Image: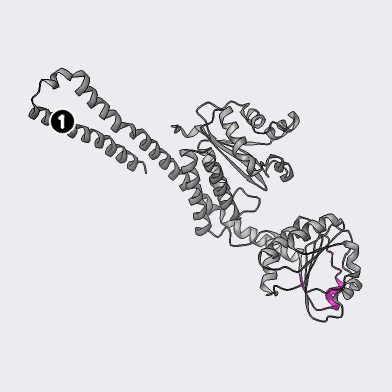
Amino acid sequence: MFITNLNQLATLAFTHRTLDINRIGVLHIQPDNLAQRLTHVKQQLDLQELMMLSTCNRVEFSFTSMKKVVPEFTGIFLRTVYPELTEKELEEFALNSDYYQGSHAVEHAMSVASSVDSMIIGEREIIAQMRQAYEHCAVAGLTGDVLRILNRHVIQTAKKVFTQTSIATKHVSIVSLAYHHLKRLQIPLDSRFIMVGAGSTNTAMGRFLKKHGFKNFAVFNRTFAKAQELANELGGKAYDLAALASYDRGFDVIISCTAAEQHIITPDLYQYLLQGDTGRKTIIDIAIPQDLNPQILKQYPVKHISVSYLQKILNKNLQERSKELEHVAKILREAEREFEIVFQKRQVELAMRSVPMAVKRIKSDAVNEVFKEDVKSLDPQSREVLEKVLGYVEKKYIAGPMKLAKEIMAKHE
């Protein structure tokens, strides 16, 4: 059933704006369990359509309902989707949720797809994530006409934002900035990498490097299990941090990011790691405070990329992206108005589907029921003329409302 009022469309969102991303992780649903769980929710809550978007910093549910959504709906929804959560957890998520309805839900969807609502403004990955989320739910039979046309319009709008503005042209994450600086140095793919630290930053950096063909990694970390985990992902070898003092295989690039309060890489350690190599090395130190002793930069030929240097570029890039927000807002406002027209047109199309059958039914009733005896008394020639007249009226009666509906919609564009 197609909803006739845009206010019957809603979105329930749990995002980085109100929740720690680790807590958002609790709401993720495994892909192989998604269809079954959401089908149950759709049936239990009598929803017409349902879709779930799940990323590292948001979990959102978009749905349509013929029923009026009551204030306590969020709690009911959460309890239905996540029966394993405790009452305390359900209350936590309910209090830290955002609810959007009607045109506000449309506006929110466009802001998300255009990355305006993202942790990192201008991140293109969200477009693919939204498309995949819709496709998974569509294949599972959870979506319908409204979410179909909404998703299509939202994706088109996001593409327009990224092509007609400069919102995504400047890198705004330390990891992406560090990688692109490394790329400019044209480091060979067989370069030897020493990675000091196996936290989220080095993990993200390692994934960037592996994705682009680098494969020679030695991972050092205070907790060996974490070093092993990252090394396995990168196809490298894991070591305890203490083993760095006896590592004799040489290196081309050091990437360091630990939470140590003192310098991890001292001049003596650096000299040992060189193993007599006098060539210029590259060091990416994205730790705060720095892992690299500044004396090393004075004593050895080093291409040094520090977190303070990257932060200056990041701040500048963020300012550049912020300038584009006004342009993006204009595109989104126009897209919202366009969607309202698309939504109205679709309602008319669906409503008009019943007209031809209704006219045919009226014609049949007139000939076979109401005027049955009169029609029987007609000679063959008269009956033929009657059929032609009724056929003409039927055709014109169907075409008239169709034409009128299109004219009315055209005037509102």
Is 251 on the left-hand or right-hand side of 406? Answer: right
Can I make out residue 330 in this image? no
On the image, the x and y values in percent for residue 317 come to: 64, 61
- Quarter of the image for the C terminus: give it: top left
Dot 1 amino acid type:
Glu
Residue closer to the observer: 396 or 124: 396
Q: Nearer the viewer, residue 186 or 49?
A: 49
Extent of the magenta region:
291-304
* Residue 36 visible somewhere in the drawing: yes
* Quadrant in the picture for residue 300: bottom right
Q: In this picture, is 123 found above or below 94?
A: below
Look at 81% across and 58% down and name the residue there.
228
Where's residue 40, x and y in %? 60, 31
Q: Is residue 221 left or right of residue 67?
A: right
Q: Few, some or many C-alpha atoms within 10 Å of disc 1 (few <14, some 14-19, many ≥20)? A: some
Q: Is residue 303 magenta?
A: yes
Residue at 22% in and 35% down: 395
Q: Where is mark 1, residue-wise?
A: 387
Q: Is residue 160 magenta?
A: no
Q: Quadrant of the N terminus?
A: top left
Q: Pick whichever, 241 or 124, lies toward us.
A: 241
Q: In which image quadrant can residue 377 be found? A: top left
Label 1, secondary structure: give it: helix
Q: Which of the 4 image quarters holds residue 140?
A: top right
Q: Is residue 242 above or below residue 161?
A: below
Residue 338 place in picture, x, y as percent: 43, 45
Place of residue 222 in the rendered image (x, y in percent of width and height, measured from the top left): 87, 58
Q: Colour scheme used in the picture?
A: one colour
The answer to whether residue 121 is left or right of residue 237 is left
Q: Position of 159 compared to 310: left or right?
A: left
Residue 322's place in the image compared with 112, above or below, is below
